[in-house]
Image (cartoon, helix red, strand yellow):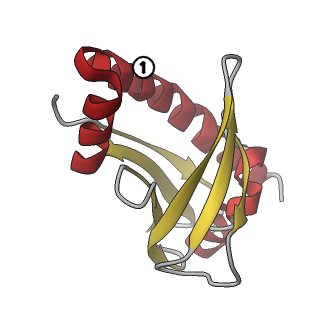
Amino acid sequence: MGKWTHSESIMVSRAPDDVYAMVADVTRMGEWSPVNTGGRWDSDDRGVGAWFTGRNVTAEKTWETQSQVVADEPGREFAFVVGGNRTRWGYTFEPVGDETRLTESWEILPAGEEYFQERFGDDAEAEVQKRADAARTGIHDTITAIKKAAESK
């Protein structure tokens, strides 16, 4: 399999700290994501090392994932890895004048590629491609919805 990544950016007319506060509250992700219906923290811990459970729903299925926060810098970056080592989702918040360049990124990590290979065998690449296609659409829809919500405050 190849390197599976995607990212997209959008300008948001809010300060980086404000946009970060929205995104880093995993319980709110369902307000913006077309697939994720929100998350719940698995303990009182927050920041790097904290775990949360996210719930996802599509027309075909419903599933939950456990993720670990791997980057938590208020106003700069928030990122987590699904399954602890499989897929990295990240958000960066870059000040540009009075606005924020919000970038959402997605990457299948080596352990994720191994997981798909073990689970799907010869169909692994096609299964990852389905997820890559969904990530491309989902990222665009998510950051567009975050922008709309942030700018309506």
Would you identify the image quadrant in which residue 115 lies?
Answer: top left
Of residues 34 and 63, the one nearer the viewer is: 63
Of residues 23 and 148, the one nearer the viewer is: 23
Residue at 26% across, 35% down: 4
Q: In this figure, which residue is indicated by the disc labeled 1?
A: 130
Of residues 25 and 41, the one nearer the viewer is: 41
Image height of 77 relative to 4, above or below: below
Q: Secondary structure at mark 1?
A: helix
Relative side of 126 to 49, left or right: left
Relative side of 144 to 37, left or right: left
Does residue 49 appear in this view? yes
Residue furthest to the left in view is 2
Estimate the x, y position of residue 87 in percent, counting from the top left: 38, 48
Of residues 56 and 137, the one nearer the viewer is: 56
Quadrant location of the N terminus in the rendered image: top left
Estimate the x, y position of residue 14 in percent, counting from the top left: 65, 63
**Count of residue discs:** 1
Residue at 61% across, 32% down: 141
Image height of 139 relative to 82, above or below: above
Residue furthest to the bottom in view is 45
Relative side of 109 to 41, left or right: left
Q: Amino acid at mark 1?
A: Lys
Image height of 92 relative to 114, above or below: below
Estimate the x, y position of residue 78 in percent, counting from the top left: 49, 67
Quadrant location of the C terminus in the rendered image: bottom right
Would you identify the image quadrant in which residue 70 lies?
Answer: bottom left
Residue at 65% across, 52% down: 54
Residue at 62% across, 40% down: 142
